[in-house]
Image (cartoon, rainbow, N blue to C red):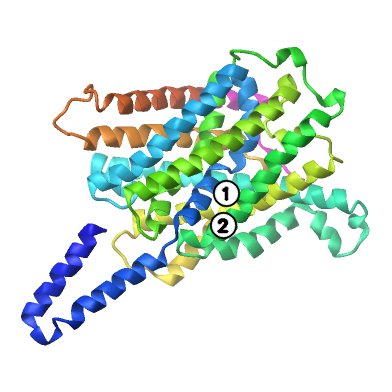
Amino acid sequence: MPLLVGLLDASAIRRSIDSPEDAYSEPRIDLEELAAKRLAGGGLLDSVANMANSILGAGIIGLPYAVRQAGFFVGLVLLVVLCGVTDWTIRLIVLNAKLSGQNSYIGIMNHCFGSSGRAAVSFFQFAFAFGGMCAFGIIIGDTIPHVIRSVFPNLYRVPVLNLLANRQFVIALCTICVSYPLSLYRDIHKLSRASGLALIGMLIIVTSVLIEGPHVPEELKGNPNARWTFLGDGVFQAIGVISFAFVCHHNSLLIYGSLRTPTLDRFNKVTHISTAISLVACCTLAISAYIVFTDKTQGNILNNFGFNDTLINVARFCFGLNMFTTLPLELFVCREVIEQYFFDREPFHMQRHVFFTTSILCSSMIIALVTCDLGVMLEITGGVSATALAFIFPATCYIKLSAPHEPWYSRSKLPAVACASFGVVVLCISLFLALGKAWTPAGRATICI
């Protein structure tokens, strides 16, 4: 921003030399335009709402399962450590943007590693965001119709209205009537109000699990002797689930650019507040659910509760609402990747904007309509992409950009080297486990009838 002000002032001075009669009017116009650009952005609370909503998405529901896989104590340590690493790498992306003079994740990778880096980050960003959109659509179909059928058990007998209990109809209705209009916005801070409502819904989910957990029937509870385990046999699976839950790196520069006054200090505040809120919510949900269900903890913790639990049905409904207000955030990323990769030097075009918005949204909706489980391919594009975007790319770019004259093993670069090495190990093991699962019946996609 100081550079922009300097350029405006310099251009005004040059114009005043060339045209003395305009010396007083031109700077005033430039400052008015600059003020208008600043006022067009969102405030700290808007950005906190968007970032926290990006973090507290579908992944939070799987965190109790991650604790079960890693063991209670190791699981909690992983939650705290990976949250701290996430906070650091989110801020690292913006710092890399400053060091490289770029304004996008794609631009940073292109600056550091050329066309191969540009292609790699584009692929992983699009794959992660699009996979998230598909998952969100599936979750809508698995939550909203069930809640409607629970509240109105005889609805299936009513003509026309019985469509509200149909999974495919509800997915299409929510996607087209709610997610699509929100996705047509060009500025991500316009979604801050929807993100605020989604955060309230997530608070209801966490509170519902916290309250209802101790009151579930005994046959639904897990083995109480398995509560205080130290180390489980699924640590790497747990790392993948937790990483998927915390990743919002593909949104970081969009959120930074949406700030009314985008500075590193203001963005650092947004990141710290957002990750702190997310960590509290994640730990509350993970601990309260795991100590009740222990060895019976499922990937979606809401499935551990009875189908007639009123408060949990409210939580399921809120979870569904959260999904179709979070889905546009992921579509922003998909559309931005395409725009920056293929149309980087072209001006904005409304027809192109609407075409890509419609195409991406309809594609994800169709996948959600025809399958209840994306299977092993979603695990590969989700878990592997999350690791690359959150740990490997930010750290390797920082190693490349920070103090180029210093070796990679210098003290200032060692944390980034450790982060990138950790990411590579997790990515390789996650990919190996996902491909191994593809050869078993568990890896087959489930088609909805």
- Identify the residue at image location x=56%, y=38%: 378
- Image quadrant containing the N terminus: bottom left
Front-lying residue, 221 or 443: 221
Q: Is residue 163 above or below residue 224?
A: below
Q: Is residue 224 above or below residue 138?
A: above
Examine the image and state in which quarter residue 211 appears: top right
Q: Residues within 10 Å of mark 1 (few under 14, many from 20)?
A: many
Examine the image and state in which quarter residue 15 appears: bottom left
Residue 433 appears in the picture as rendered: no
Q: Is residue 104 above or below residue 235?
A: below
Left or right, 311 with reference to 388: right
- Identify the residue at image location x=38%, y=48%: 267
> Which stretch is magenta?
434-449
Q: Position of residue 174 (x, y in %)?
A: 68, 59
Based on the picture, tell me whether residue 146 belongs to the magenta stretch.
Answer: no
**Residue with the mark numbered 2:** 361
Q: Residues within 10 Å of mark 2 (few under 14, many from 20)?
A: many
Measure the alpha-carbon separation of dots 1 and 2.
8 Å
**Residue with the mark numbered 1:** 133
Based on the picture, tell me whether residue 448 belongs to the magenta stretch.
Answer: yes
- Identify the residue at image location x=41%, y=43%: 123
Q: Is residue 430 above or below residue 87?
A: above
Q: Secondary structure at mark 1?
A: helix
Point out the tag, 1 or 2, that comes first from the N-terminus.
1
View extreme (left): residue: 17
Mark 1 touches mark 2? (CB < 8 Å): yes
Q: Position of residue 70 (x, y in %)?
A: 59, 19
Q: Amino acid at mark 2?
A: Leu
Q: Amino acid at mark 1?
A: Met
Q: Position of residue 126 (x, y in %)?
A: 46, 47
